């Protein structure tokens, strides 16, 4: 997985077996607009953000993507 920051990018390697959950979280930006993120929660408790939305993101779309990831990882 590659995490992109403003001035650099970082590659993170984790085992698929270490993923305990896939969650969609609701966040609020500085303008108080809501957006959603898809996070992998590892067995260690570490959270990895996979996809961050914009303030006009559709929660249902994020839930569908998270469900597909759960299915692939067999997290039921």
Image (tube, grey):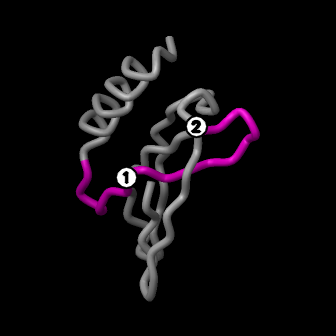
Quarter assignment of residue 17: top right
* Image quadrant in which the N terminus is located: bottom left
**Magenta residue check for 52:** yes
Q: Depth-wise, is mark 1 or mark 2 nearer the camera? A: 2
Residue at the right extreme of this rendering: 44
Q: Secondary structure at mark 1?
A: strand
Q: Residue furthest top?
A: 76
Q: Please give the name of the residue rendered at 51% of the width and 17% of the height, measured from the top-left corner.
A: 75
Q: List x then y, in percent, for residue 67.
A: 36, 24
Toward the viewer: 23 or 5? 5
User: Picture coordinates of residue 33 (x, y %)?
Assistant: 38, 64
Check the image and report above or below for 21 versus 28. above
How would you rate the neighbour count of disc 2 (Cα within 10 Å): few for under 14, some for 14-19, many for 20 or more? few
**Does residue 61 lie above or below 71 as drawn?**
below
Q: CA distance from mark 1 to mark 2?
A: 19 Å
Q: Is residue 13 above or below residue 59?
A: below
Depicted 70 relative to depicted 62: above or below: above
In the image, residue 45 lies at what x, y percent?
Answer: 73, 41
Q: Earlier in the sequence, mark 1 or mark 2?
A: 2
For image coordinates 50% across by 35% down, the residue present is 23
Q: Nearer the viewer, residue 4 or 67?
A: 4
Foreground residue, 24 or 55? 24
**Which segment is the magenta one?**
41-57
Dot 2 falls on a residue whose secondary structure is loop
Residue 51, label in figure: 1
Res. 53 image quadrant: bottom left
42 left or right of 36 in image: right
Question: Which label sits on residue 4?
Answer: none
Location of mark 2 (residue): 15
- The residue sitting at 43% across, 44% down in the picture is 38
């Amino acid at each position: 997985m590659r995490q992109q920051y403003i001035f650099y990018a970082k590659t993170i390697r984790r085992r698929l077996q270490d993923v305990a959950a896939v969650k969609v979280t609701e966040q609020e930006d500085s303008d108080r607009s809501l957006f959603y993120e898809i996070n992998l929660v590892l067995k260690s408790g570490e959270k990895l953000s996979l996809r961050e939305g914009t303030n006009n993101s559709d929660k249902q779309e994020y839930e569908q993507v998270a469900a597909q990831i759960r299915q692939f990882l067999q997290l039921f």
